[in-house]
Amino acid sequence: MDFFDKQLKKAFPKSICVFSIEDCKLIFEMYFDLYKYYTGHEHPPIKTEKLIAMLDNIDGDGLFDAECYPELIRSYFETPFRNCDRNICHFMSGKIRELRFYETCY
């Protein structure tokens, strides 16, 4: 996690993230912990450019707040997907979070 902490500290100021860096760190740490639990191995490194893009859209245009992420992440890992490596890039893409939101938090 030390590498990711440094990467987050570098990426965060370059993003337009509306959450605090502390909230973002908790969200990513929870995701990585559950990834390891479900897959049996560490999450692969994320390119800094990808991390900045995720931070830029972490609130889903105002749909999500930091407090709903634990349930979104748990729901994501409990949802069956075909041919999915469970990478955080998949979780943050398209309508994945939005669908989990409507299933769990709405």
Image: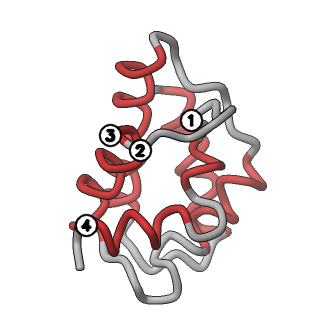
Q: Which amino acid does the dot numbered 1 rest on?
A: Arg
Cα–Cα span, label 2 and label 3: 17 Å
Q: Label 3 neighbourhood size at 10 Å, few (<14), some (14-19), many (20+)?
A: some
Looking at the figure, which quarter contains the C terminus? bottom left
Q: Which amino acid does the dot numbered 4 rest on?
A: Cys
Camera-side residue of 105 and 13: 105
Give the residue at mark 1.
Answer: 86
Give the residue at mark 3.
Answer: 30
Q: For the residues carrying marks 2 and 4, which lies nearer the camera in this image? A: 2
Question: If you read the primary sequence from the N terminus, does the residue marked by circle 2 or circle 3 appear first?
Answer: 3
Question: If you read the primary sequence from the N terminus, does the residue marked by circle 2 or circle 1 appear first?
Answer: 2
In the image, taking residue 53 as reference, residue 38 lies left or right, namely left
Give the residue at mark 4.
Answer: 68
Cα–Cα span, label 2 and label 1: 10 Å
Cα–Cα span, label 3 and label 1: 14 Å
- Residue located farthest toward the bottom when viewing the structure as drawn: 62
Task: Tell me which corner region of the image, top left, top right, bottom left or bottom right, holds residue 13.
Answer: bottom right
Q: For the residues carrying marks 2 and 1, which lies nearer the camera in this image? A: 2
Give the residue at mark 2.
Answer: 79
Residue located at (55% from left, 49% from top) = 8
Cβ atoms under marks 2 and 3 closer than 8 Å: no
Residue located at (32% from left, 40% from top) = 30
Cα–Cα span, label 1 and label 4: 19 Å
Looking at the figure, which quarter contains the N terminus? top left
Q: Which amino acid does the dot numbered 3 rest on?
A: Met
Q: Label 4 neighbourhood size at 10 Å, few (<14), some (14-19), many (20+)?
A: some
* Element at label 4: helix
Q: For the residues carrying marks 2 and 3, which lies nearer the camera in this image? A: 2
